[in-house]
Image (cartoon, rainbow, N blue to C red):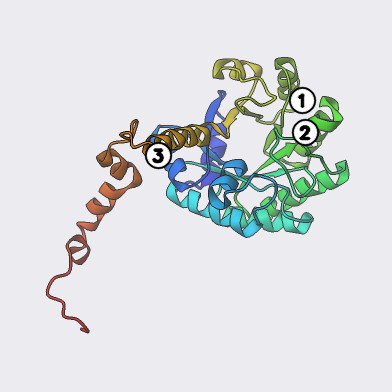
Amino acid sequence: MTTPADRLRALLAQPRLHTMPCAYDALSAKLIEQAGFDLTFMTGFGASASRIGAPDLGLMSYGEVLDQARNIAGAISMPLIADGDTGYGNAMNVRRTVQGMANAGCAAVMIEDQLAPKRCGHTPGKAVVGREEAYDRIRAAVDAREEGQDILILARTDARHDHGLNEALTRAQKFRELGADIIFVEAPRSEAEMREVCAATDAPNMANIVEGGETPDLPPEALEEIGYRIAAYPLSLMASAMQAMMQTLAEMKVGQPRSNLMDFMELRRRIGFDDYYEASERYATSARPVTGAREGS
């Protein structure tokens, strides 16, 4: 049986773009897989919002993020890329983060060069550490992989924001030299910059498409032509889910019928009730309610 990392390597070896809706919890990941996508990413923005009801500003701890990743990986069979933020400390913490995500069943983990506490890549106030600290983070992540963790390293730089594209490309090239498997230069601001990003290294590159963000929201065929191997959509599902929930709440507030609801039978099926009942038929005591039991027995 292939590992999650093996399945991701096979996807990246294909000379095409993989559209990657991002999950914020186990249920959203299941829906992505049911819709026929090949892989997903645990969005830090969405995980923070859904788990603690707070913005992605470094408020979630390593333990909380690891638990969220483990729950998502356990609910799907497709590869999951986890958001490892800054690694939650120094280089030794980065090693532990990589080890933890591998043990949780993740196919890859993203490590970035922001100052801690990190911020969402398309929000104000983010800054990056110096080059050597950034390189140490990726060096530590790669060391953890090379010492037996079956996981890919996605190296991210946010240097474009404060230091310009050239600095971001310099870091990306060094990350690849150090052994990163996937490169992510956050927030290029034009198609021309996106082309420079993809030409800078021989690594698979990931585009991060945030609706209303700084990077052009190009169609998949254009992203593929530019040279991207993965197109991540970190907020699309959460934004659509929140919009639908707000609509339903507004209708309930004024006593209107709830519109645009998933049919109850389909909801049960997608969550997994039908699969559970089918599997439980193998076990007589699990397939039917207990009868004849006396209190205290």
Of the two numbered discs 2 and 3 in the rendering, the one whose residue sits closer to the viewer: 3
Q: Which mark is residue 200?
A: 1
Q: Residue at x 31, y 41 (%)?
A: 267
- As drawn, the residue found furthest toward the front would be 254
Please state which amino acid type lies under the numbered disc 3: Lys
272, above or below 240, in the image: below
Frontmost residue, 54 versus 154: 54
Q: Which mark is residue 58?
A: none
Q: Indicate left or right for 257 with 248 as reference.
A: left
272, above or below 166, in the image: below
Frontmost residue, 60 versus 39: 60
Indicate which disc, 2 or 3, sits on the residue closer to the N terminus: 2
| Circle 3 Cα neighbour tier, 10 Å, few/some/many (<14 / 14–19 / ≥20) | few
Q: Quadrant of the C terminus?
A: bottom left
- As drawn, the residue found furthest toward the bottom would be 296
Element type where label 1 sits in the image: helix
Indicate which disc, 1 or 2, sits on the residue closer to the N terminus: 2
Of the two numbered discs 1 and 3 in the rendering, the one whose residue sits closer to the viewer: 3
Quick check: marks 1 and 3 in contact, CB under 8 Å?
no
Image location (x, y in percent) of residue 266: 28, 38
Q: Which mark is residue 253?
A: 3
Image location (x, y in percent) of residue 254: 38, 36
Residue denoted by label 2: 172
